[in-house]
Amino acid sequence: MAASAIITGLVAAGGLISKIIQAADTAQHNKRECKNLASRVQMIAELLPQVQDPEAMRPLAGLGEALTEAHELVQSCQRKGRTYRFFAAGRQSDRFREVQGRIDSLLILFPMVGLIGLARRLDGTGHVSVLNRASSSSVHSAVSHEVSESDSEGAEVFTLAEITAATKNFGVVLGKGDSGTVYKGKLHDGREVAVKRFRHGQRSAEATFGTELAILHPVSHEHIVRLLGSCAEDEERMLVYENVDNGTLRDQLNNNASPVATSWKARVGVLLGAARAIYHLHCRAIPLLIHCNVTSSNILLDRSWTPRLAGFGASVWRAPDVESQAVDIVQTYGYEDPEYRSTGGLKPATDLYSLGVVMLEVLTGNQPVVAVWEETKKTMVDTTLVSWALPTIEAGQLGDVLDRRPTTEPTPQQRQALQLVASTASICLRLQGDNRPAIPDVVANLEKALQLICNDMFGRL
C-alpha cells in the first residue's frame, strides 16, 4: 500500500466518520443506536492519525467498507414513515448489532496496529523513536504530562542474548500464567527486571504480547506496572518490566507472615492503589482503556509495597460514551462478570465487578474460588467467593466472614472502615453493570476507609 494510498484512505475514512456523526445527530429513529455507533467511529477518528505506515494499515483493510455500511445504516434512520419503521425495525436491529460488532473488532486491532508502527520506527540505537504527534496534537496534548521523561524516549528493544544473560538463562521463575512464564533478571546496567516469556507457537500468546506492548508503552502511572522494553527474535516474544520485589496481592494474602496479611491498613491501601490505576484507565488514559482481567494475581507489590496493576494482555481500547462493546474476552473463573457472560457486551463496569471480587478476597483472606460443604452430595465442592461471602455481608454479618489475621477483633473505627469496603464491594458486584458505581466513587470510598483506619491508629498512639 503506497503512501499516497494511505493518505487517500485516511481522508476517505475521515470524511465518512464526519458524515456518520452528522447523520447520527439528525436521526429520526433508532437514535440511541445511532449515537452509540457515532461514538465508536469517533474513537476511530482519534486513533487514525497514528496510522501512517503502509504495513500498519494492513490489519485495517476492512475499515472503509465497515464505515460505508455504518454510514448507510445511520442514513436509513432519517426516514420518518411509520410503515417503513415498522417493517425495517427488526432488520435494522440486526444490522446495528452486526455493524457495531465490525467496528468493535477494528477497535481491538488498533493496539496491534500501534505495535506494528512501533516496530517499524526502531532507530539505530535500539530504542523506539518518538511518535510524530503533529497530526494528532489534540489527542496527545493532554497525555504529555502523564508520560515521564524516560518513557518519552521509547521502549527499549532487547536481544535474546541480552535477556538470556539478564535472567541467567531463565533460571529464577517469579510466576507462571496461561500465556507464559515470568523470570527474574538483572540488566547489565544494574536494573532489576521481570521478564515475561510468552509460550512458543500460541496464537493467543502472540496476540497478548502485541496487545500488552502497544497498550503499556505509552501508559505511565504510579499504580500501573512499568514496561521497560521487549524482545521479538525468531520465535521468542518477551516483555521486560520493572521488577516488583514482593510478588502479587494473592501471594501476600496466602502468606500468614506477610505485612499485607497482618494489616488492615496495608490491605485497604492496596485496594486503593488498584482502584486508582483503574480510574486512570477508565477516565484519564488516551485512548481510554478497559483492563478486562483485574485479579489479585495481577496486582503486584514493589519493594515499598506500592501496588501496581499488571496483566494487560486482554485489555481493550474503548470509545467514550458507548455503553458496551461486542468484544470477545476470556475472564478468570471467580472474577467473571455475569452481565458480560450473558450479553457479550463489555463495559468499564466489568472491571468494577472484578475489583469487587478482589475486595472480598482482601476482607475474607480467601481465594476467588472456595471449597464448601455440599450437604446433598456429602462432599466438598468448589464455589465462587462471591456466592459464598456476599449473602452473609448483605445480611449485615460481615464479622462472620472477616479474616481474623490482621486483628482478632477490629476496633470500632476499623469496623466502620471495613464495612465501607464491604458495602462498596457489594455494589460493585451487582448483576447489572449500570447499577454498579463509577470508578471515581469507588476511589472516594476506599480513600475514606483508609483514612478511618489511619485516624484510628493515630488516636491509639
Image: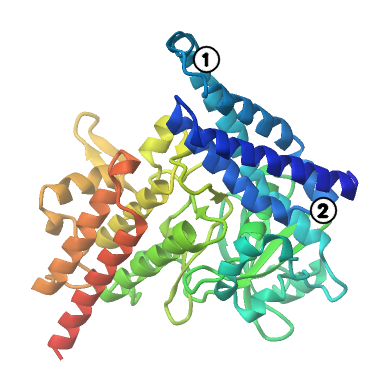
Q: Is residue 275 visible?
A: yes
Q: Amino acid at mark 2?
A: Asp
Residue 91 shows which numbered tag? 1
Residue 53 shows which numbered tag? 2
Q: Is residue 102 above or below residue 80?
A: below
Give SS at disc 2.
loop
Compared across the picture, whether 140 is left or right of 407 comes to right
Residue 417 location in percent, x, y? 18, 68
For disc 2, the neighbor class at 10 Å (few under 14, some 14 to 19, many from 20) is some
Q: Residue at x 62, y 70 (%)?
A: 241
Q: Is residue 411 visible?
A: no
Residue 307 shows which numbered tag? none
Residue 309 location in percent, x, y? 48, 64
Compared across the picture, whether 90 is left or right of 450 comes to right
* Closest to the observer, 50 or 308: 50
Q: Residue at x 20, y 29 (%)?
A: 376
Residue 273 location in percent, x, y? 39, 69
Compared across the picture, whether 60 is left or right of 280 comes to right
Q: Residue furthest right?
A: 2
Alpha carbon distance from label 1 to label 2: 38 Å
Give SS at disc 1.
helix
Q: Residue at x 68, y 30 (%)?
A: 68
For disc 1, the neighbor class at 10 Å (few under 14, some 14 to 19, many from 20) is few
Residue 14 location in percent, x, y? 69, 44
Q: Is residue 461 above or below residue 296?
A: below
* Closest to the observer, 318 or 251: 318
**Which quarter of the figure has residue 421?**
bottom left
Q: Residue furthest bottom?
A: 461
Q: Please state the total of marks drawn on the protein image.
A: 2
From the image, which quarter does the C terminus lie in? bottom left
